[in-house]
Image: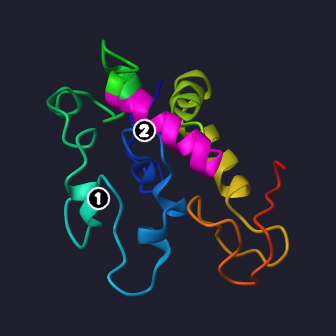
């Protein structure tokens, strides 16, 4: 699989969340630069995240949990369960998809997935409605 070097690819957090779909990245004031950003503001939950700060991730080439021998670890499984229940987002599935199709294809899919079909604005995984037009979150994937 290709090294993760593009700016877009850097917006995939170690746990499989697309930072572009996070409310901290979408907000206009004190906008988070993403979990992997080394400079600029970062959401408190990202700065203190045990997955993001995992010592095994520091040794990996892409900084994604699937590179770990413990994948999926207990912490990732807990976060995945919460995101599946609250937001209908499968983090472990995202990581497996990256592993299978590569980061570039995954990012192309994510661009469509998180774009409002009504107004074209970016959607948030954390909100049921589009922040731009207010319509229920409905994506190209359904």
Q: Is residue 98 left or right of residue 41?
A: right
Residue 110 position within the rendered picture, expressed as x and y whole percent measured from the top left: 64, 50
Q: Residue at x 42, y 56 (%)?
A: 7
- Residue carrying label 2: 79
Q: Is 34 included in the stretch rendered in magenta?
A: no
Q: What is the total number of numbered labels drawn onto the structure image?
A: 2
Q: Quadrant of residue 25?
A: bottom left
In the rendered image, the residue lying farthest to the top is 69
Using the rendered view, name the quadrant where residue 132 is placed: bottom right
Query: Considering only vertical position in the picture, is 110 above or below 92?
Result: below
Q: Secondary structure at mark 1?
A: helix
Above or below, 25 against 110 in this view is below
- Give the class, few, some or many, for how many residues have Cα within 10 Å of label 2's Cα (few <14, many ≥20): some
Is 21 on the left-hand or right-hand side of 121? left
- Mark 1 or mark 2, earlier in chain: 1
* 54 relative position to 72: left or right: left
Magenta-colored segment: predominant secondary structure: helix
- For disc 1, the marked residue is 45
Residue farthest toward the bottom in the current orientation of the protein: 29
User: Is residue 78 shown in magenta?
Assistant: yes
Closest to the observer, 6 or 92: 92
At 50% from the left and 42% from the top, the residue drawn is: 82
Helix, strand, or loop for circle 2?
Answer: helix
Q: Quadrant of residue 33?
A: bottom left
Please report the residue visible at 59 percent of the width from the left and 65 percent of the height from the top.
Answer: 124
Q: Distance between the Cα atoms at labels 1 and 2?
A: 12 Å
Residue at image location 37% in from the left, 77% down from the top: 31
Across and down, in percent, residue 119 comes to 80, 79
x then y, percent, for residue 118: 85, 74
Q: Position of residue 91 (x, y in %)?
A: 52, 37
The range drawn in magenta is 75-89
């Amino acid at each position: 699989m290709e090294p993760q070097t593009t700016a877009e690819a850097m917006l995939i957090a170690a746990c499989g969340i697309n930072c572009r779909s996070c409310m901290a990245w979408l907000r206009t004031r004190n906008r988070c630069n993403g979990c992997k950003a080394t400079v600029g503001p970062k959401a408190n939950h990202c700065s203190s995240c045990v997955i993001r700060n995992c010592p095994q991730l520091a040794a990996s080439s892409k900084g994604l949990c699937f590179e770990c021998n413990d994948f999926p670890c207990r912490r990732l499984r807990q976060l995945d369960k919460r995101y599946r229940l609250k937001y209908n987002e499968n983090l472990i599935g995202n990581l497996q998809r990256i592993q299978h199709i590569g980061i570039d294809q995954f990012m192309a899919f994510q661009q469509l997935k998180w774009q409002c079909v009504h107004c074209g604005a970016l959607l948030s995984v954390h909100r049921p409605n589009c922040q731009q037009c207010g319509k229920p979150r409905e994506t190209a994937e359904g």
